[in-house]
Amino acid sequence: MLLTIIIALPLLGVLISALLPHRAESGAKWVALLVTGADFVLAAWQLVQRGITGTTGMQLETSLSWIPQLSVHYHIGVDGLSLPLLVLSTLLCFLAVLASWKITVKPRFYFAMLCLLSLGLNGVFTALDLVLFYVFWEVVLVPMYFLISQWGGERRQYASIKFFLYTFFGSVFMLVAIVALYLYTGSFDLTQLRDLIAQTAALKGAGIGSIQWWLFGAFFLGFAVKVPIWPLHTWLPDAHVEAPTAGSVLLAGIMLKMGTYGFLRISVPLLPQGFSGWQLILGILAVISIVYGAVVAFAQKDVKKLVAYSSVSHMGFAMLGIAAGTAEGFNAAMAVNISHGLCTGMLFLLVGMVYERTHTRQIKDLSGIAAQMPVYAGIFCFASFASMGLPLLSGFVGEFLTMVGSWKSPALPGIITVIAGLGILCGGAYMLWLMQRMIFGNPTPAVEGQPDITLREILCVVPLAALVLVIGLSWNTLLQFTDPFAAALVKILGA
Amino acid sequence: MSTIATITTSFLPPFNGYAVLVAPALLILVAFFSLFADKLHVPDRAAAVVAAVVAAVGACWMALGADNVILFGYQLVYTGDARFAATAILVLACAWFVWTAAAGTGRTREATALAALSVSGAVLAVAALDLIVMLLALELTSMPAYVLIGYRRYRIQGLEGALKYFLLSVLTSLFMIYGASMLFGLAGSTHFAELRALTQSPLSLLAFVLLIIGLFAKLSAAPFHWWAPDAYAGSEPWTVSFAATVPKFAGILVIVRLIQLVSTGFSLAQSLLLIGAVASMVVGTFAALTQSDTRRLLAYSGVVNVGYILLVVAASAGPDGATYSTIALVSSVVYALAYTAATMGVLLVASGEGGRLSDLAGLSKRRPAAAWCLALFVLSLIGVPPLAGFFGKLELFMTAWAAGQQVFVVIATVVTVVSAFYYMRLIKAAFFDEPERQVAASEDSAEDTADVAPDVAADSAAPETPTPAPTSRVGVGVALGILLAVTLLLGVLSGPIITWLT
């Protein structure tokens, strides 16, 4: 019931802000703030409660029959994999509303879309029925399309249609795989499918070319586009650069995690034998993403694009963790998910703030921020360090565990881990170079005379910074949720 | 009192059954009323108002009426699927009549009469289980549509389109009748149940090929689709929105029923249907990509969508087709409704603007609510959940996959992705493009006068109604609201709907 409220509250926000009278259109942001704030409080409360009591396994389940003839259910629930992501999603939606406070163009439409996005995200991370999952998965697409295309930058039309088509392309193949799974097993239920698949004779047989391998491939297309894994990443820089700040924050902070979540929730546990045939391919693609993202990030002149490519690199670590197939690897993937959501969310918020002031994102036009906006510069450096994966900050948890996990993995050759390690080095280098060029040096005319970060803006980034510190200092705050799930996954793979 | 009760009960059983026909009968009356509305000195749009009310009543009547009505010795059978289809057709018709009553321009009463006749034919066609009844009902459905396409007789393009539509349709009707007569010769009966005993032979196959050609043309499935873009583009979005939906809905049900009841196990018939399906999907998709006219775009999208449906029609024509007959019927009816409701919605939104994509520019500023309706209709056509089109497609693809057509499902999936590209152009036009001129609606009237055929221009056809009644925004809202409700609820309420259908 509580989860249903968390999913349905944003719907209320959509309806109220869309139907506000024209005179009261500035009230839309308050509606959105209230709704997303309430959502975050409810989700965070659940997380804290689970953290204290230490309960594991599927919680807060609700199952109602939806289309009985096709055995489609409204089945939702959360576990150690999804609850942290649900909290992250509600938090980032709340902060996205806060960061969009100055939106004056069509505010009702804008905040209705933000609420709809929040609904879709909450739904994706709680759905336990494949059809329901797919419904929410696609619901996310529509508001993001409108956010980019209505409030985006100059090339917004190109970027938004590219984003829509790329992700739609991936997801229809996922739908084909869902249909195929249903026709083999007669169920869409994620909690039952694992056993049903294990019992189905037609789905037995491991390795490349088996039915499981093909089904994994179809899911792979759906999830890999979202992550995104090289070479399916090309929509991401365009979408990020053209999206408004809130759009970038949600895109990088949480929508990319839908992809890795899909692997961990659906592909790997349901199709373990298919996964074994894909491990090496996933590992190689992941390490290419890591290195490619990092190298291309070096060359960027636009700071938003740099952060976008760094996302490709960082999400590569999550994918490498998954490809490893070890407990450390799965924990790493989940830790990278959360940590990258926090760090990149922060970075995009900060870039958005400086863009609002200077109307430029060119790194060369932005040097000398430290002299002009010292508080901002400090927070930016903190976010960059977190993104680099400095020890005691959250980024380190994921990167360290990825290294351990992929080194220990029997399926991946050691060289992959070595190359990924070089990727970490690159990650440090381009972020440091960015800081040197953007934060330090002599102020440019664009930066000259700009006011420092305001209280509202500090409020946007402080929760994220605090979580980065907490997770970095005490890994267990996060791993206590993810570890039981990772252990269960390893057990499935071993069986 | 008790005598009346006895009389009623003794009278009821037969009456109860034939009562299903009240809906089509009333619609024929409406058609007559509309034709003679001149003599009654009522406003022009009164006919459409009456028709809308009758269609709404008819829809309720059909939905709530008795189940499993068998009439005229199994020639018309209203079971769950036929009643659902008839209800759906009446709901679509109701939306169209409401829009006509609210915003129709020029003379609308004859259009109302034609549409009412067509709807009454469609309501009969979906229940027909006899070749002759089926052919007659299908003709009654499509003949008024030819006239509707050429409704503005002073527009050359419209006449050209109507003529193309008419000639091809008549020709293919002859094909169908020829095929049907062969089937009768082989089986000695026109009833589907007795035709089922037919075995595969050269003559029976020829008969099927002829019937399939005829139905392909009626449904604008490739390679018999080329009349549709010209016919639609020559006409107004308003008349297209009827001609492209109601007759097609009836045609879809007829082809599903005919193929599944008659040709089970005809492997060649199955191959033909699959070829038609793939050809429709591929040809329609690539042709739609470059269109700059809403009507043409939707004509090609219609070709693609019929292709999807032909996949499950083919599934039920296979050697073990009987296994899939129920689910094939269910999924194609659900998809047909999802597709026609969204198409009619897009065209009705376009009716207020103009037929070209560029006419939609700036719609989100002029009519934000209509723009949002358009967006939802388009997303349903793309197949984005939780809208009707998604659930329709899900059921279609599931049926086809289960019937062993995995390769074709993958083709359909790719086609769906590509289709998103051209459908999104409608959203792009409505939300992002700036209008080239201040008043886009004037363009359509300019087009009207430019295209006037010289010999009919003097006929004073155009300025027949000098002062058109003002558009009722509430009426337009109700019409779009009906279609929107179908688009939003059809998928979410799949459970009860499938129960009803089976």
Image (cartoon, coloured by chain):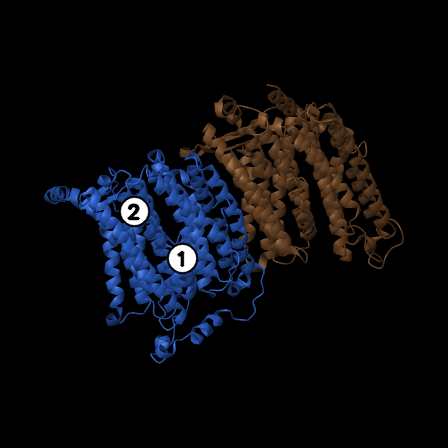
Chain colours: A brown, B blue
Kind of residue at badge 2? Leu
Q: Earlier in the sequence, mark 2 or mark 1?
A: 2
> Does B435 appear above or below A75?
below
For this orientation, the residue located farthest to the bottom is B458
Say which element carries label 1.
helix
Q: Residue at x 59, y 26 (%)?
A: A207
Left or right side of A465 for A92: left
Mark 1 neighbour class, 10 Å CA radius: few under 14, some 14 to 19, many 20 or more: many
Which residue is identified by label 2? B206
**Horizontal and vertical percent for residue B488?**
45, 47
Relative vertical location of residue A221 with respect to residue B157 in this rendering, above or below = above
In space, the residues marked 2 and 1 are separated at their CA atoms by 44 Å
Q: What is the quadrant of residue A25 in the picture? A: bottom right
Give the residue type at disc 1. Answer: Ala
Number of the label disc, if any, that sits on residue B479: 1
Left or right: B15 as drawn, with respect to A386: left
Residue B133 percent across, percent down from the top left: 23, 50
Nearer-the-camera pick, A95 or B401? B401
Discs 2, 1: same chain? yes
- Callout in the foreground (2, 1): 2
Chain of the residue under label 2: B
Residue occupying the far right of the picture: A442
